[in-house]
Image (cartoon, rainbow, N blue to C red):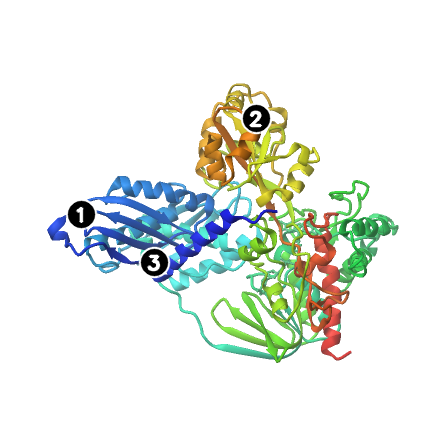
Amino acid sequence: MKKHSKLAALALAGAMILSLAACGPKDEPQNSQTPEETGIYTPGTYTGEAQGFGGTVTVKITVDANNVTDAVVEGPDETESIGGAALGTLADQIKTANGGEIDGVGSATMTSNAAKNALADAIARAKGEEVGGGETAALKDGTYTTKSPSFGLLSQMECETTIENGTIKDVKVISESDSATGEWFATARDLFIPRLIESQSLATDAITGATISSNAIRACVASAIDEAGGKSGEWYTEVAKKSDTVKLEGYDVIVVGLGGSGTMSYCAAAQEGATVFGIEAAAKVGGDASTTYGPMALNSEYLKNLYTDGKDYINADDVYKVWMEYVESDEKADIIAKAVYNSGSALDYYVENFGFEFQGLGLLGSFVVPEWTQLWCVYSADNDNTSWNILGPNKTFQFVRALDIAKSKNEKNDYMTELTATSLIFDGDQVVGVNAESYDGTKYEIYGKSVILATGGFIGNADMMNQYLGSTVNTMGVTVNKGTGIQMGQSAGGATYMMGTLPMVHISQVKNIIRTDDLTADQKAILTALALTTDQTMVTTEGNRWGNENQSGTQDEGVTVEIVYAPDYMYYVVYSQEDIDNIKNNGLSEAQASATSAFLAQGGTLPAAGTPVADIEQILTVGEQYGNVIKGTTADLAKAMGCDESNLKAVLTEDTTYYAVACVSYAYATVGGLDVDVNMNVLKEDGAPIANLFAVGQDSEGVCNKDGKAYSPWGGQAQSWTFVSGQIAGTQAAKVAKGE
Ligand SMILES: Cc1cc2nc3c(=O)[nH]c(=O)nc-3n(C[C@H](O)[C@H](O)[C@H](O)COP(=O)(O)OP(=O)(O)OC[C@H]3O[C@@H](n4cnc5c(N)ncnc54)[C@H](O)[C@@H]3O)c2cc1C
């Protein structure tokens, strides 16, 4: 996999923008002429800043005596497909308006409002006027209905904000499409809204784990303030944080991260009689594990009783053999044996002792070995006990219930959410505890005899992604997982293992999912089909041919599994002008008309093959605005893709306009992690175990995998590893703490 100079350059640019923002607005007049002498502005370059959707939006204008001659709008933290995509248009509007008001971009209200506020400050500076002074704009009482793109794929979030006596009195989310029952959305709604009302500040921190939903609520309220006649830019007063430090001492076991593997670790340690403290960064427990289908479980007694009259339902020896062939080494054979032969008993242990419930054996077959029809099962959900799809029914209650059972085993046992572990505490080179910080700013020093690292890998850490996997990847999971556990293990001298195992990808979609109304659902489905179809020419980000001969052939295997091998975890599906004209007049091909995204679909219906698509150009134009389509000659494509044109020319031989539609991987999590032994003890480079430090789940999943390969994709294996590794680590950590 190539190292990505393009991404490095973007990261550098981002860092530069951030450092600029950190320094605050700067007035940089080029000379000392006064406005009276020369015109309305003092010539020079001026900046203004305001809070956008994700962070600071900076407007930099260059003026001569009477005109705005240049404008740049930067917003490194804006959502790439919405606010980020609007930045260029906003800059153009500022130049055209030449000191007047700009319209903004309808699909990016929050970024547009920030640009308007930042522009006002920059203009004021250019005029030598006071910035930020004067009266705060008054608000008109009322209830305002406003919208913002959110996590939902089907429509935007809609809120009713009640303004009374110049304050935000109430906020209600009145519609929130397919994540309306999503647990992360509910967490944001229940926690963010009261905090925002209490602080009366749009600078209220997003809820950890539910950032997108929190920011969407924030955007709705900001629009309501603007509609009420106020200036939302004035509502970002700093929210005070605490600065005290709390010490918690005397624990046997500390578990860092209470997702899949952390919850099992906590339970197993408590079951062994240890006193346990759990640290969870997100506002709810369960992590990625609570959004999944479910675990692989080979010949679990519980499942056998439910489904196969007590009979074995899979040959576990076969699974072990295939797995050993996959890793091409017997270095971790003892661990892989546990992963195989303990998978059923770990599930049974959870069911018997901690009330977990599963179902659906055989609903999902193996991804790669068709004969393994009964391999994994799914979590039961609370709504009707038969639904198990992702991002919908509540499964977190199972994790909470298990933790509460474990907690009740000793009155000292406890756990906290919205508490982020930052580093290990050492006494000499001995691990003695964990430093953490609460959402309210309170620092915690938590002391314990054993520490279990369960922070779910590093998908949310761009630096680690670039370092170990050559590129970041679009995500379909918890980006709270920033590799903290792996870094904590490394700080204790721990080694890593198979960090180059490819991230967990089963989903492809367009690069920037369009969550606004700029296209209808049916139009979005067509854009998706153009990205996912396998019957067109495909090129990598390096401009080389991709697909067909690289792929296994079927839509599922070809696109959703093997895309992970493409550089940058993406490729382009390229259409010539003739292809597009053909779709316009004669419709989609059979392959295109059946190319849908199972998980990230947006509710649209594809036209039958052969039905003319009259609006194809409009679809492509909006796709282009959102960074999903590149249109132009091979030279234009090469420039936008950052590749060598000669590569493209070898594949795209016609002298025509091309449309390159990006098809991108969406990954659940990373796989490589800390090196561990069969007890889940973190190992040093020399192979020596660190006696009281353990790593589980994605933080040690590399031991079951192989650099450069897609992760062991039998089906449910990752979840299963959380159970197996968590049970072993919790039990061992308790024993070590008790000196057994
Ligand atoms: C949509 C989706 C579907 C999936 N489907 C399946 C499936 O069907 N079968 C399967 O086997 N696998 C599936 N997976 C993968 C599986 O969910 C993960 O491999 C598994 O959850 C990993 O467990 P974990 O404990 O390592 O991480 P997680 O369950 O993500 O838990 C990590 C926890 O650590 C917390 N954390 C992170 N940093 C810190 C910190 N600094 N301090 C404190 N806490 C921290 C996080 O908030 C999180 O709660 C799916 C994943 C996703 C996203």
Front tag of 1 and 2: 1
Task: Name the residue at 55% across, 40% down.
Answer: 542
Mark 2 closeness class: few <14, some 14–19, many ≥20 residues within 10 Å: some
Of 527 and 327, the residue lying toward us: 327
Q: Is residue 653 visible?
A: yes
Chain-order first, disc 1 or disc 3: 1
Q: Quadrant of residue 421?
A: bottom right
Of 553 and 142, the residue lying toward us: 553
Measured along the vertical axis of the image, is residue 651 above or below residue 36? Answer: above
20 to the left or right of 555: left
Which disc, if any, is residue 607? Answer: 2
Mark 1 closeness class: few <14, some 14–19, many ≥20 residues within 10 Å: many
Task: Name the residue at 64% across, 70% down.
Answer: 493
User: Which quarter of the frame holds ligand 1?
Assistant: bottom right
* Mark 3: amino acid: Trp
Measured along the vertical axis of the image, is residue 33 above or below residue 69? Answer: below
Front tag of 1 and 3: 1
Q: How many marks?
A: 3
Residue located beneath label 1 in the image = 65
Which disc, if any, is residue 235? Answer: 3
Which disc, if any, is residue 57? Answer: none
Where residue 118 appears, as percent x and y from the top left, is: 31, 52
Figure quadrant of the C terminus: bottom right
Where residue 380 appears, as percent x and y from the top left, is: 70, 52
Q: CA distance from mark 1 to mark 2?
A: 56 Å
